[in-house]
Amino acid sequence: MKQNDIKELLHEAASSDCTSKRRGEILADLVNASSWANDNATVIRDGRLTGMKVLLEESYKKIINTNPASLPNLLVPYTMICGDKPKDGKITSEVDFALIG
């Protein structure tokens, strides 16, 4: 998933107009784009991915329930987990810091 798309999804989920259903769909989109949702079985078995999955899902759910307006502040870790993967085999994506802010 492109970093700009992640940014837009986080802002949409943070909006007070966003429904619970839509927020669930946004989480599903992020999960589907994440590091562990790929075809590389050796990477999927890597214990680091369990931690990233917990970070993504739990932080999203807790922030939505407590302070949804702060969700866009998680753009950097969410981009690293859900962004387009580099072809060099790394499990995290590069962050374009020009898009932050």
Image (spheres, rainbow, N blue to C red):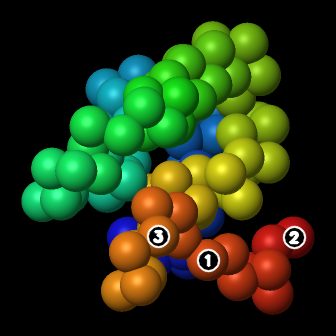
> Label 3 is placed on what type of residue?
Lys
Q: Mark 2 points at which residue?
A: 101
- Residue mark closest to the camera, 3 vs 1: 3
Question: Which numbered tag is attached to residue 46?
Answer: none
Contact (CB < 8 A) between labels 1 and 2? no
Q: Mark 1 points at which residue?
A: 94
- Residue mark closest to the camera, 1 vs 2: 1
Label 1 and label 2: CA atoms lie apart by: 17 Å
Crowding at dot 3, Cα within 10 Å, few <14 / some 14-19 / many 20+, comes out as few
> Label 2 is placed on what type of residue?
Gly
User: For numbered disc 1, what is the local secondary structure?
Assistant: loop
Q: Which residue occupies the foreground of this view, 80 or 6? A: 80
The relative height of residue 67 versus residue 28 in the rendered view (above or below) is: above
Using the rendered view, name the quadrant where residue 86 is placed: bottom left
The relative height of residue 81 versus residue 18 in the rendered view (above or below) is: below
Earlier along the polypeptide chain: callout 3 or callout 2? 3
Q: Name the residue under label 3.
A: 90
Q: Which residue occupies the foreground of this view, 46 or 27? A: 46
